[in-house]
Image (tube, rainbow, N blue to C red):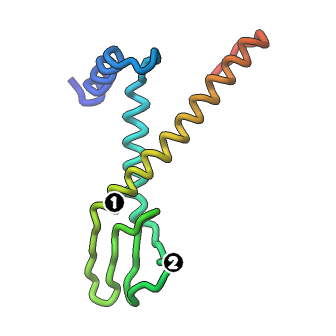
Amino acid sequence: MKLGKRFYVLCDLLSDLMVVDGLKVNWRIVAVVVVVGLFVGFGSGLVEKNPDSVGIPGRKYYGFPFAWRMVDTESGQKYSYPFELLGDCVFGVVSVSIVAGTAMLTMKMMGKKAQRSGSVARF
């Protein structure tokens, strides 16, 4: 069995088991939100962040909103801070979940509006 097929079977089993406040949880959407949020967190290491206060000369800081990767330009040494990386990943997951939730809510409201007007909503 291929990995993709196993993932969909696992998501179907979890969605049958999990019901929150009478609403069925779509585990595929949750998994995509978490994966994209982690990519956003790790991708923030490519964004250079200039410190608001005085920083150490010759060092560049990377990460948003927390600087979790530091590079010393004079010696070439790289430093990583795992707790700040975790904070960036959590920030990414929360940001993506807010965007995904807003998009799903908007699509649901548009569908209800189309039903009231008698037209068919096509997505």
Q: Nearer the viewer, residue 82 or 75?
A: 82
Which of the marked residues, 2 or 1, is nearer the chain's N terminus? 2
| Image quarter of residue 56 | bottom left
Residue found at the far front of this picture: 21
What kind of residue is marked 1?
Leu
Instruction: Say which residue label 1 marks.
Output: 85
Q: Answer left or right for 34 relative to 75.
A: right
Give the position of the C terminus as an image quadrant: top right
Q: Indicate the position of residue 34 as horizontal and vertical percent values.
A: 38, 41
Q: Nearer the viewer, residue 85 or 21?
A: 21
Q: Answer left or right for 96 relative to 81.
A: right
Mark 2 nearby-residue class (10 Å; few <14, some 14–19, many ≥20): few
Give the position of the N terminus as an image quadrant: top left
Q: Assess whether mark 1 and mark 2 are in contact (beta carbons under 8 angstroms).
A: no
Instruction: Say which residue label 2 marks.
Output: 52
What kind of residue is marked 2?
Asp
Q: Indicate the position of residue 30 as horizontal and vertical percent values.
A: 40, 32
Residue found at the far left of this picture: 1
Give me the residue at 33% from left, 60% from top. Answer: 85
